[in-house]
Amino acid sequence: MKTIARLFVTLVVIAISCAAAYELWNYYMLSPWTRDARVQADVVTVAPDVSGFVSDIRVKDNQFVHKGDVLFVLDQERYKAALAAAEAAVAARKADMQMRQQEADRRTKLTSLSISDEAKQDALYTANSAAAAHMQAVADRMTARINLERTVIRAPVNGFITNLTLDIGQYISVGTRAMALIDSDSYRVEGYFEETKIPALKPGDAANIILMSGGPGLRGHVDSISRGITDRDNPNGPELLANANPTFEWVRLAQRIPVRIHIDEVPEGVLISSGMTCTVVIPERPYNWAVPALLRQAQSVILNAARSYRGQGPRSNASLTSRGLERATRPGPAS
């Protein structure tokens, strides 16, 4: 009796060990998880639309700013003078337009005995030209006002100022990159999953994110799966023809496909920074574990075999019965 009990315990331990080993192998090889993941965010390069010397800096390095906050200010004296000149030009053009319009109105009322038709048309065209010059002056004034407003550079998005090297007195040309602003609303995780694990992923799946720095994990979900990566082994040839690699290794490494993970919740006190390394795990329900799935598959095979066997029996009996009835009802030879 003791021998049977020992044998039974041994078999149970072996079965549990095999099941655990199979489950671990399936988790490591096929379950959707990866240690090759990075925290990423969009970086907005702040550049002025006008040129000038930096007269004031309103932010510090690594400071959080809201959309619309003033980042820095360029020297405004030249642009204020340009706006004043544009205002004066508008006033001058307006006066000239009014004078030309009044002159054209007076000449229009005169008869042909005192003024020729050609002079009337010249006066009308001169008034129209003065009106166009006034509109041009108004447009120039608008441009001067915009340039003055653009000397105050504001944050285009919510985010963090990083790697600030700008200094007061520095001259900045149009389009020169002055500072980097990390969009705080764009933090996400880019996980690179092996292609063998992609079939287990779908948009909307919950994801657990464990930062390499430690601390509580982050929660997120699968946002999207990339539909293409670069084929580094077979680049295009000079005539845009396929340049196939003639070698083929017996052991082929699985390609990694980028999967974007949207961060849903960040625990309090956890700092995330663009470029951090993390691990992404897509939790599977117990229904999808390897051993239960294997048992379900075996059960399905057995049930299908049983149904197939049972289905053949009645069909054969039915065929025999129909043949017997056919024989019984067949009329005999005429006597």
Image (cartoon, rainbow, N blue to C red):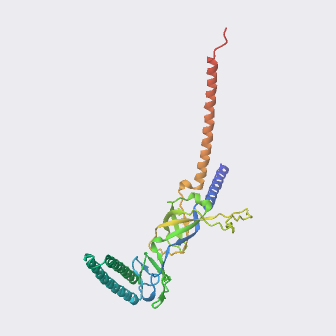
Q: State the residue in front, 177 or 316.
A: 177
Percent of width and height locating residue 67: 40, 76
| Quarter holding residue 128 | bottom left
| Quarter holding residue 110 | bottom left
Q: Quadrant of the C terminus?
A: top right
Residue drawn where x is 62% and y is 31% of the image: 315
Percent of width and height locating residue 69: 39, 79
Task: Examine the rendered structure and indicate whether residue 237 appears above or below residue 19.
Answer: below
Task: Examine the rendered structure and indicate whether residue 129 appears above or below residue 317.
Answer: below
Q: State the residue in front, 297 or 51.
A: 51
Task: Examine the rendered structure and indicate whether residue 31 appears above or below residue 130.
Answer: above
Q: State the residue in front, 103 or 61.
A: 103
Identify the residue at the far front of this view. Answer: 113
Percent of width and height locating residue 85: 36, 87
In the displayed structure, does residue 166 sit left or right of residue 126?
A: right
Percent of width and height locating residue 143: 39, 81
Q: State the residue in front, 314 or 84.
A: 84
